[in-house]
Image (cartoon, rainbow, N blue to C red):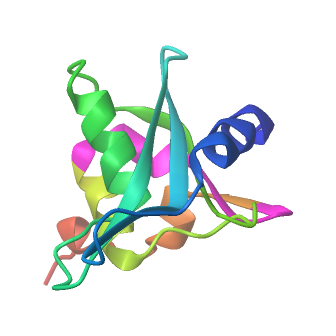
Amino acid sequence: MLKHLIEIAKNYAKPATFNGYIESGHVAAALETEDGEIYSGVSIDSACSLGFCAEHAAVADMLKEGKSVIKAIVAVDSSGCIVPPCGRCRELLTQLSDKNKETIVGVSDDVQVTLAQLMPYDWKVARC
């Protein structure tokens, strides 16, 4: 299911250094919305830790079009290996839409799970 997204992300996972303070593209992400549109992004790393993940960049690309429901998402590093989303990215994806609990997420070359499986104890549903 993620094959086409993996290929798109691989096309953008090309590390670049700009001026000694900013690097990008060590990780690239591609996502597909519920209506089949594809959005992508690259990671940004800075000397003072103000960068962000490729998944955040792909989500920002999607949000420009007013969409929030993600069918599938994957990130790859510059060697083409799938990289699972960090906790910050997982949290962002869950907060975008309750429907994203069913988002298919690539976590390794041969494992895909739903976002709900990555976030079994979501704080938004916690009850006393």
Q: Residue 120 is drawn in which quadrant?
A: bottom left
Q: Which one is nearer the viewer's eye here, 16 or 27? A: 16
Q: Which one is nearer the viewer's eye here, 66 or 79? A: 79
Q: How many marks?
A: 0
Q: Which one is nearer the viewer's eye here, 96 or 57? A: 57
| Residue 121 visible in the current orientation | no
The answer to whether 123 is drawn above or below residue 5 in the figure is below
The answer to whether 7 is drawn above or below residue 63 in the figure is below
The answer to whether 4 is drawn above or below residue 14 in the figure is above
Quadrant into which the C terminus falls? bottom left
> Relative to residue 1, is residue 40 drawn left or right?
left
Residue at the location (80% across, 39% down)?
3
| Residue 9 visible in the current orientation | yes
Q: Where does the image place residue 103, in percent across and percent down from the top left?
A: 52, 45
Q: Residue furthest front?
A: 19
Q: Where does the image place residue 112, in percent across and percent down from the top left?
A: 72, 58
Instruction: Indicate yes or no whether the magenta region holds residue 69.
Output: no
Q: Where does the image place residue 81, in percent across and percent down from the top left?
A: 75, 66
Q: Which residues are magenta?
A: 96-111
Instruction: Indicate yes or no whether the magenta region holds residue 101.
Output: yes
Residue at the location (24% across, 66% down)?
125
